Image (cartoon, rainbow, N blue to C red):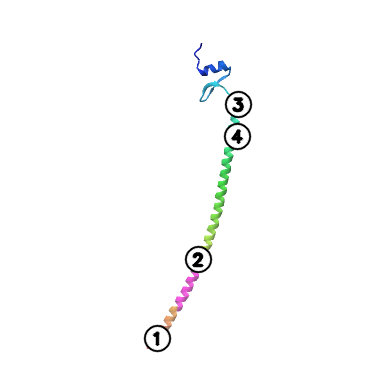
Amino acid sequence: MDNLTPFESFPKVLNECSGYIRGLGYGPKPTKRERIVADYSEVRDEIQQLQQATTQRETEISDFKLGNILLKEQMEVMKLNILEREKKMKEESIEREKHLRQELMAEFMAMMRSSNGVM
């Protein structure tokens, strides 16, 4: 009786072709059809993962674009508010200046009257 290892006894007992299988060593070699089916399955799974990733990225891009549009709209509203406030402040400043001029003129006139009466 020969002292054979299990890997050496497989081909003799089962009459299978031996081949090196990565991680398993020598043993039964998968048929070409099995390798093609396995490769096709792996490629199909990878394509599906890539399609899902692409869909997710497209959704993210679309969300970013929508967010960008909303930010632009908010900026426009803020610009309009700033312009309105500047206009209002300018108008208020002009009104205050007119009021101060009137008060100064009234005080000046009052001083003139009192100085005319004193002399």
Q: Secondary structure at mark 1?
A: helix
Query: Can you identify the residue that label 4 sits on?
Result: 44
Secondary structure category for the residue under label 3: helix
Which of the marked residues, 1 or 4, is nearer the chain's N terminus?
4
Q: Are marks 1 and 2 in contact (CB under 8 Å)?
A: no
* Residue 94 colored in magenta in the image: yes
Q: Which residues are magenta?
A: 84-102
Q: Earlier in the sequence, mark 1 or mark 2?
A: 2
Q: CA distance from mark 2 to mark 3?
A: 76 Å
Q: Quadrant of the C terminus?
A: bottom left
Residue 23 painted magenta:
no
Tell me the residue that label 3 is attached to: 34
Q: Which mark is residue 85?
A: 2
- Disc 1 versus disc 4: nearer the observer: 4
Give x and y (percent) for residue 116. Answer: 40, 87
- Mark 2 or mark 4: whose residue is earlier in sequence: 4
Q: Give the number of the mark in front: 1 or 3.
A: 3
Does 42 appear above or below 10?
A: below
> What residue is shown at x 53% (from left), y 16% (from top)?
9
x 54%, y 52%: residue: 67
Q: Amino acid at mark 4?
A: Arg
Residue 114 badge: 1
Q: Residues within 10 Å of mark 1 (few under 14, many from 20)?
A: few
Judging depth in this view, the residue of 16 and 20 nearest the camera is 16
> The residue under label 1 is which amino acid type?
Ser
Rounded to the nearest whole Å, what is the CA distance between mark 1 and mark 3?
118 Å
Q: Nearer the viewer, mark 1 or mark 2?
A: 2
* Type of the residue with mark 2: Arg
**Residue depth check, mark 2 versus mark 3: number of the one nearer the observer:** 3
Q: Residue at x 46, y 76 (%)?
A: 99
Q: Dot 2 lies on which element?
A: helix
Spatial CA span between label 4 and label 3: 15 Å
